[in-house]
Image (tube, helix red, strand yellow):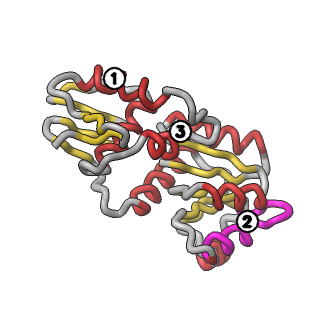
Amino acid sequence: MRVLVVEDQRQLADSIARVLRREGMAVDAAYDGAAALERADVVDYDVVVLDRDLPGVHGDDVCRALVARESPSLVLMLTASGTVAQRVEGLGLGADDYLPKPFAYAELVARVRALGRRHRSATPPVLVHADLRLDPSQRVATRGGARLPLSPKEFAVLEHLLAGRGRVVSAEELLDRVWDEAADPFTTTVKVTINRLRAKLGDPPLIETVARAGYKISP
C-alpha cells in the first residue's frame, strides 16, 4: 500500500510515517498542502492521511482538489476538532474517513488498512494460493501451515503479487507500490527482495520471473 501523510507538525508526520512503515506500507510525507498536491500529481496513492488544519493551502482545499481531479486516493482526514458537525463537514468535502486528534496509532493503522481494502475492493481480506496463505490485517503469512519469517518489504511484495492473481508485475511497479519516494530506481532492491522471498517460500517455487517484463505468481 502506498500512503501519503500530510501534516504540518513534522514530528507527528514523521512519527505516523514510521508507524505505517513498520506495518509494511510505503509512506511519503508532505508538510503542507501545496507539497501534498504536487506529490499527488505524480503518484496514485492508495490512501492520503490528511491533516485538516494545514496552514497555507488548507486541508479542506487539498481534499476538494483531490476530489475535483477524480483522484483514486482515499482520504483519511485528521483534525483536533472531533465534534459531530466537524466530522460531517469533513466527510461532506469528500473525505472517506475521519479521525479526531489525539488518536491511538493502532486505530490509525486499522483505519488506513480498511481504506486500503476499499481501494482494492476486488481483493479478498485473506489471500490464498495453493498452500500459501497471507493475512494482511494480521501481518501473517504461512505455507503448509508453517509461519514464514518475512520482513515487511518481503511481505508487501508477496501481498502485491498475490493480489495480482497471476498478472505480471514489473519491477518498476513493485518499486512504486512497495517502496517510497526515497527508493533509488537504479538499484537491485527489487531483485534482491524477490530472491530472499523465494528462499523463504521454499519449494515448489511460487514466483516466476517473466523475461523483460517482471514477476508473477505461478499458476
Label 2 crowd (10 A; few <14 / some 14-19 / many >=20):
many
**Magenta span includes 60:** yes
In the rendered image, the vertical position of residue 37 relative to residue 112, given as above or below? below
Query: Which residue is nearer to you in this view: 169 or 91?
Result: 169
Tell me the element at label 3: loop
* Sequence-wise first label, 1 or 2: 2
Are the residues flagged by discs 3 and 2 in contact, CB closer than 8 Å? no
Residue behind mark 1: 149
Q: Position of residue 99 (x, y in %)?
A: 60, 59
Residue behind mark 3: 179
Label 1 crowd (10 A; few <14 / some 14-19 / many >=20):
some
| Callout in the foreground (3, 2) | 3
Magenta segment boundaries in residue numbering: 52-67
Residue behind mark 2: 59
The Cα atoms of the two marked residues, 3 and 2, are separated by 25 Å
Tell me the element at label 1: loop
The Cα atoms of the two marked residues, 1 and 3, are separated by 20 Å
* Sequence-wise first label, 3 or 2: 2
Observer able to see residue 138: no
Image quadrant in which you'd find residue 217: top left
| Callout in the foreground (1, 3) | 3
Q: Residue at x 29, y 20 (%)?
A: 199
Label 3 crowd (10 A; few <14 / some 14-19 / many >=20):
many
Q: Position of residue 5 (x, y in %)?
A: 65, 50
Query: Which residue is nearer to you in this view: 1 or 59?
Result: 1
Q: Residue at x 51, y 56 (%)?
A: 46
Q: Position of residue 219 (x, y in %)?
A: 16, 43
Outermost right residue: 56
Image quadrant in which you'd find residue 55: bottom right
* Sequence-wise first label, 1 or 3: 1
Disc ID at residue 111: none
